[in-house]
Image (cartoon, grey):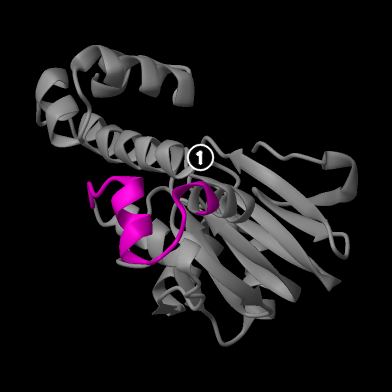
Amino acid sequence: MILQAADRVRQAATAEGRLQALDPLLRLPRHRHGEAYAALVLSGGYVEAGDAGRRRLVAGDVVLHRAFEAHANAVAGAGARVLNLPLTSVRVATPFGRVADADAMARAAEHDAVGAGKMLLARAAWTECDLADWPDLLARDIRSGSSVPLAEWARRHRLAPATVSRSFRSVFGVSPKRYRLEQHALAALKLLTLGSTSIADTAAAAGFSDQAHLSRTILAMTGRTPRSWRR
């Protein structure tokens, strides 16, 4: 698991899971994890802005992360305690949810983190993103596959393109252009792991200009080539 500002993130192993204590007002820059996992807030809270959207999380909330998704975190003034549980896959319509008894999940994770992760998926009530400023709307449009140029999107919302790009980066930690590229890469990675289409067809389906562009992006994001993922 990849973490920025690790000196301010105290961790303790719980079986195969990991308990994190996040300092008050800590800001974790955008970072990426190589494995799928669920983050369950046990106390306190933070705002997460990432490849699945942006949401304010409090005790009892859970957010699911697919492998190689990226996100940034802004911790609240009270800090936060978070339990990370390993997942074999993420197959829900929305990654944000809530559980009635977070402490029960934590107790289960002390003996079986994988089983606790499965229990969480079965018991959580899933919800949508709850923040709706214009950066969230732009991120939502990008995730939905919109190909509207940034200048045109800004004009429709009566904003200056430079303001849109700068403010989006301040919220999500990456430019709108890069956010769109990484959404394409995540879609391509999903197709590659299914192995049902050729690499060239995957590149076209995921919105890449050509196979070479796909290969460079996937290699930079995951450290592996599209061919190795397809195998």
User: In the picture provided, is 19 more to the left or to the right than 101?
Assistant: right
Q: Looking at the image, which residue is at 58% across and 48% down?
A: 166
Q: Looking at the image, which residue is at 38% across and 57% down?
A: 154
Q: Position of residue 29 (x, y in %)?
A: 70, 44
Residue 95 appears in the rendering: no
Which quadrant would residue 23 be assigned to in this image? bottom right
Which residue lies most toward the bottom here? 100
Q: Looking at the image, which residue is at 55% across and 70% down?
A: 55
Mark 1 packing: few (<14 Cα in 10 Å), some, or many (20+)?
some
Which quadrant would residue 176 be assigned to in this image? top left
Q: Where does the magenta region start and end?
A: 146-163
Q: Nearer the viewer, residue 210 or 175?
A: 175
Q: Which residue is mark 1?
A: 35
Q: Quadrant of the C terminus?
A: top left
Picture layout, residue 201 above or below residue 29: above
Q: Looking at the image, which residue is at 56% across and 58% down?
A: 49
Residue 57 appears in the rendering: yes
* Residue kind at label 1, given as amino acid type: Glu
Q: Nearer the viewer, residue 56 or 13?
A: 56
Local secondary structure at mark 1: loop
Q: Position of residue 141 (x, y in %)?
A: 31, 59
